[in-house]
Image (cartoon, rainbow, N blue to C red):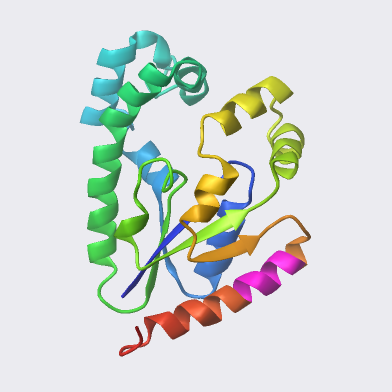
């Protein structure tokens, strides 16, 4: 099994790369999806989040109001660290379970936004960074996700800087261009990952 860490700044296009790799046969384990799973209604994770941040982070139906919680923690590094201390260990444990369920064959892609921030690069055989200039990230967040400039800049500032992410990259996908160009690069990436996954390769 080749363990791949896939990361990129918000708005860089990591999710699209993840989707394209899955279409080529990679087993993709999405940290964001797992993070939602571990705080679903009835889970210990949700109970801990409510205990830490109060019932105001719940929607009327009892599920987590993620935008509301996001507003709280993105404005305060200490609160963000408190949330991460609750959620991250649960996400890591669940992702490990999913990886074991995938078996030993093939290429397992861990789609993780915060590899650089949390010092996780050493846990993968190779780290792939999806890169885009900050101006492109900002434009995408405002046009595609409806964020204000202030909201988008705050989200970007809460993550590692572009140089910090690139410093951990084994391979880089430049997603500043078109979808067709991205597809071409992902095809080349898949060829390289399959080469790396061959038994006997260093």
Q: Position of residue 85 (x, y in %)?
A: 27, 29
Is residue 148 visible in this depiction of the protein?
no
Q: Nearest the camera: 46 or 119?
A: 119
Q: Which residue is located at x 29 percent, y 68 percent?
A: 102
- State yes or no: residue 116 in magenta: no
Q: Nearest the camera: 26 or 187?
A: 187
Horizontal side of 146 relative to 45 (left or right) equals right
Horizontal side of 88 relative to 22 (left or right) equals left
Q: Quadrant of the N terminus?
A: bottom left
Horizontal side of 83 relative to 193 (left or right) equals left
- State yes or no: residue 182 in magenta: yes
Q: Quadrant of the C terminus?
A: bottom left
Is residue 49 visible in this depiction of the protein?
yes
| Range shown magenta | 181-187
Is 198 placed above or below 109 here? below
Is 134 placed above or below 29 here? above
The mark total stands at 0
In the current view of this chain or complex, which residue is farthest to the bottom? 200
Q: Position of residue 75 (x, y in %)?
A: 50, 16
Horizontal side of 189 relative to 193 (left or right) equals right
Q: Nearest the camera: 51 or 77?
A: 77
* The quadrant where residue 63 appears: top left
Q: Main secondary structure of the magenta part?
A: helix
Q: Nearest the camera: 4 or 118?
A: 118
Q: Which residue is located at x 42 percent, y 40 percent?
A: 117
Q: Position of residue 68 (x, y in %)?
A: 50, 17
Q: Position of residue 103 (x, y in %)?
A: 25, 72
Q: Which residue is located at x 44 percent, y 19 percent?
A: 73
* The quadrant where residue 60 appears: top left
């Amino acid at each position: 099994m080749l363990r791949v860490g896939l990361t990129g700044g918000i708005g860089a296009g990591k999710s699209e790369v993840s989707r394209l790799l899955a279409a080529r046969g990679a087993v993709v384990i999405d940290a964001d999806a797992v993070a939602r799973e571990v705080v679903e209604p009835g889970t210990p994770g949700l109970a801990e989040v409510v205990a830490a941040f109060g019932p105001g982070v719940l929607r009327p139906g009892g599920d987590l109001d993620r935008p509301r919680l996001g507003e709280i923690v993105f404005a305060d590094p200490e609160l963000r660290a408190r949330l991460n201390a609750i959620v991250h260990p649960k996400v890591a444990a669940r992702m490990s379970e999913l990886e074991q369920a995938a078996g030993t064959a093939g290429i397992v892609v861990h789609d993780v936004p915060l590899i650089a921030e949390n010092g996780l690069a050493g846990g993968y055989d190779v780290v792939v960074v999806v890169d885009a200039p900050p101006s492109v990230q900002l434009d995408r967040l405002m046009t595609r996700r409806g964020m204000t400039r202030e909201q988008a800049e705050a989200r970007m500032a809460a993550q590692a800087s572009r140089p910090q992410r690139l410093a951990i990259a084994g391979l880089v996908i430049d997603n500043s261009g078109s979808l067709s160009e991205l597809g071409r690069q992902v095809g080349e990436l898949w060829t390289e990952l399959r080469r790396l996954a061959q038994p006997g390769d260093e």
